Amino acid sequence: MNCKIILVLLIFSFVMGACQGGRSNNSGASDWESVPLSYAKEFTLKTRGDSTRVTVYMDESHTEAVSQSFTLTNRPSNIKGDEEVIPVPCKRIICLSSTQLAYFFALDDIENIVGINSSRYLFNEEMNERVESGEVKKLGKEGNFSLEIIAALDPDVIFVSPYKRGGYDALRNLGIPLVPMAAYNEKTPLGRAEWIKMMSLFVGKIADADSIFKRIEKRYLDLKALTANVDSRPKIFSGKLRSGSWYLPGGDSFYAHYFRDAGGEYVIKNDEQGAYPVAFETVYRKAVRADFWRVVTPEKPGISLKEFLSQDHRYADFKAAKEGNIILCNIREKPFYEQAAVKPEVLLADYIHFLHPGLLFDYKPFFYEKLK
């Protein structure tokens, strides 16, 4: 009888241990459920209960060696694992790029931002007021951040660019989570816009982000459909000389997708996805007969076509210049960097307006203007 009791107790202990072991495995990777994304490729989301694991990739290999993972949760004590745990919603946020601010502007949630890298070319009135009042601190530029101010702000998280390295080692020593913002590496406009879903996790606005993105997606796809069967596709090229080099977007780049979706033909036909420096002569050979020339650059307010062409006498040789078809976004006058990421449908409408003026009746461009 005693042996039977002992056997029962052993079996009971084994079963209970297995159950407890199963519960403890909840922190394991197998229990995380992937969240489907429609366009974004440079981050992934997985959920378990009220926690979300965010993985951000820093290059195209998408390997663990070039990724960073974070677990966002309102119950940090329940999380075990190697990835960094960030309690959410975050109440004290630092953004070290205006492109990061774009997502918080779109979510109408900037009261939690306590520091930015600079207010140069900052157009958002509310953010400018917060900077003026001292509610938001300016922290300097990459490589020259004010560590004293950052430490005093005691932020919950700092969003950084994985493409700029200056000053980040010193920031890491402060023990503050540094979340890389790799949206710039997305190859499609809607992919970059979908990062609003990731950013919304930090401020608890997931439903808002989903709603905003659905509106963006629908408008973008509707506009793209307008140009699907156009009779002609004007040729277009991009960029200008900077310090003796012309940084040319590749034929499969982010901007190439915009030009094709707008019913244009991008003059660069290679498979390059990023921008790369080339000599003027290389651009000239490919673009001299192109119909349109697209430029994003800081210029003096109200710059004229004549003033722009005076920057290099060879500019006047391009067909687009001769016909007055230079479409320029002056970042000193337009909120390009703080809005473009979450307004791909507006950018697409701008391009369509110039390339196919008959398709959008009574449309007024927002980011671009044709130099006169």
Image (cartoon, rainbow, N blue to C red):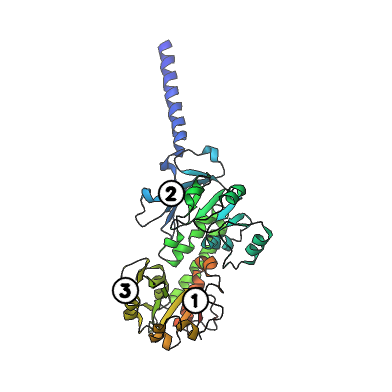
Instruction: Determine the CA span between mark 3 and mark 1.
Output: 23 Å
Residue 334 vs 45, above or below: the answer is below
Q: Which amino acid, by three-letter code, is at mark 1?
A: Ala
x, y (%) of residue 109? 61, 58
Q: Which picture quadrant has residue 236? A: bottom left
Q: Which amino acid lies under the numbered mark 3 shown in the image of this protein?
A: Lys
The secondary element bearing badge 3 is classed as loop
Residue 337, percent across and down?
52, 67
Residue 20 location in percent, x, y?
A: 46, 30
Residue 90 appears in view:
no
Q: Is residue 23 visible?
A: yes
User: What type is the residue that disc 2 sits on?
Assistant: Gln
Decide which of 280, 10 is in the foreground and name it.
Answer: 280
271 or 38: nearer the viewer = 271
Q: How far is disc 2 from disc 3 in space, using C-alphas?
A: 33 Å
* Percent coordinates x, y for residue 135 in the rendering: 66, 56
User: What residue does disc 2 label?
Assistant: 68
Label placed on residue 269 = 3
Q: What's the CA distance linking mark 2 and mark 1?
A: 35 Å
Q: Residue at x 44, y 15 (%)?
A: 5
Which tag is nearer the camera, tag 2 or tag 1? 2
Residue appearing at x 41%, y 42% in the figure: 29
Upstream in sequence: badge 3 or badge 1? 3
> Dot 1: few (<14), some (14–19), or many (≥20) neighbours within 10 Å?
many
Task: Identify the residue under disc 1.
Answer: 349
